[in-house]
Image (cartoon, coloured by chain):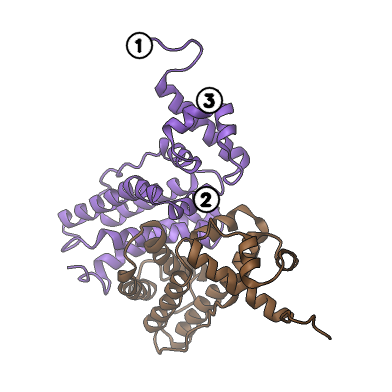
Chain colours: A brown, B purple
Amino acid sequence: MRQPLGRPRDGRVDGAIAAAARELLAEQGYAQLTVDAVASRAGVGKAAIYRRHATKQAMIFAAVMHDLELETPPDAGSLAADLAAVTRVIATTLTAPPPGVVPGMLADVHADEGMAAAFAETFVKAERDCVTEVLDRAVGRGELAHRPDPARVHAMLLGPIFAWLFLLLEERARLPRLAEALAADVAHSLTTGPGRARDA
Amino acid sequence: MRQPLGRPRDGRVDGAIAAAARELLAEQGYAQLTVDAVASRAGVGKAAIYRRHATKQAMIFAAVMHDLELETPPDAGSLAADLAAVTRVIATTLTAPPPGVVPGMLADVHADEGMAAAFAETFVKAERDCVTEVLDRAVGRGELAHRPDPARVHAMLLGPIFAWLFLLLEERARLPRLAEALAADVAHSLTTGPGRARDA
C-alpha cells in the first residue's frame, strides 16, 4: 500500500504518539498534558490521535503501557528468591513512569469503566500471571502444599510497594531494601504462617 | 458579633461546605464536582469557599477529612489482635468515601506540594501514630524485642488493603477476611519472620 509522502507509516505513528506523550509527561507532568501538545510533538494531526484513542486518558494509558514489559522472572530456585524477583519487577514498573503519572492514571481508571477494563486486562493480568506462576513453581518444588489465592498474594506484594511510593510518600532510595524484606516476609508467611492452609 | 441575617455562622459554613461537597461527590463523582455546585448546594457564595480553600482540590480534601476519625484502637491484649483492629480502621477509612474519591484525591496530592504536605500531616500521620502505638504496646508486652520501623509496618498493613480496593479492583465483600488474614500474617512475620531483627 502506498504511504503518503513525508508521513510515517501507521506503526510508526503509534510509536511517535507514545514517545511524544511520554516525553511530555516527563517534562510537564500528568495534569498539564494536552492532546494538542502530543500531536504537535509527534508531528501528527489531532485526528490521528483520536482515531487511535477515544480520550486523552486512553492515549496516556497506551503510551505508559506501550513499553511495559512484565515478564515472569526465570525460576530462581526457591519461593523466597522468586518472590524477591517479582517485587523487583513490581518496583520497576511503579518507579519507571515520571512523577504523578501512576496516581493520575489510577484516578482515570476509577473514573472510566473502559479504562478500568483495560487496566485489569493489561497491568493487573500481567502481574497476576507472574504471581500465579511463581506460586505454582513453589507447589511444584514442594515448598507449598497447595497454591494460595493469587489475588491475596498479589495484594501482599504490590500493596506495600505502592503504599511506600504513593501513599506514605517515603524515600525511593529505601525501596529496594523494603521490597527485599517484603519478599522474605511474604515467603515466610506463606510457608509457615497462620494463613498457610487458609486458601485450601 | 452580629451575624448577617439568614446566613449561618462561620463554623456552620465550614460544615455546610463539607457536607455539600460530600453529598455531591456521592451523587456525581470526583471528576464532575465543581465549586459552583458546592456553593449552590451549601447556600453560600463561591467567595466563601475560596476564602477557606485555595483550590477545588483543597476543598474536597477538607470535606473528606472533615469527619475522619482515626483513633488508635484500645489495647486488645496482643499484637495480632491490635493489628487486626488497625486493619479494620484502615479498611473503614478507605471504603468510606464515595467511589472514585480516594484515587482522585491521591492524584491531586501528587499534583500539588501543598496537598502532599496536608496529606502527610493528617491522614498519613494519624495512621502512622496508630501503627507506632500498637508496636510500642507489643514491645511493652514482650511480644517484640524492639520496635520495628513503623513506616515499613504501615506499608505492610495499608498497602494490601489499598491494592485490593483500588489497584486490583477486587470484591469489597472479601475485604474483611483479607484484612483479618493480613493482620495475622504481619503479626506472624514481625514475631517469627526473617525480618524480626531487621530494624534493630
User: Residue A50: x and y, percent?
Assistant: 72, 64
Q: Indicate the secondary structure of the residue bearing disc 2.
A: helix
Specify the subunit that label 3 lies on. B
Give the alpha-carbon distance from disc 1 to disc 3, as whole Å. 21 Å
User: Residue A186: x and y, percent?
Assistant: 37, 72
Instruction: Indicate the amino acid at tag 3.
Output: Gly
> Which residue lies under the disc numbered 2?
B104
In the image, which is nearer the foreground, mark 1 or mark 2? 1
Q: Which residue occupies 71% across, 64% down?
A: A46
Nearer-N-terminus badge (2/3): 3
Give the alpha-carbon distance from disc 1 to disc 2, as whole Å. 39 Å
Q: Indicate the secondary structure of the residue bearing disc 1.
A: loop
Q: Are marks 1 and 3 on the same chain?
A: yes
Q: Are marks 1 and 2 on the same chain?
A: yes
User: Residue A19: x and y, percent?
Assistant: 58, 74
Give the alpha-carbon distance from disc 2 to disc 3, as whole Å. 25 Å
Q: Quadrant of residue A45?
A: bottom right
| Image mark for residue A4 | none
> Which residue lies under the disc numbered 3?
B45
The N terminus of chain B: image quadrant:
top left
Nearer-N-terminus badge (1/2): 1
Give the camera-side residue of A142 and A98: A98
User: Residue B198: x and y, percent?
Assistant: 22, 71
**Circle 3 Cα neighbour tier, 10 Å, few/some/many (<14 / 14–19 / ≥20):** few
Instruction: Indicate the amino acid at tag 2.
Output: Gly
Q: Is A13 placed left or right of B42 in the picture?
A: right
> Which residue lies under the disc numbered 1?
B1
Q: Are marks 2 and 3 on the same chain?
A: yes
Instruction: Indicate the amino acid at tag 1.
Output: Met
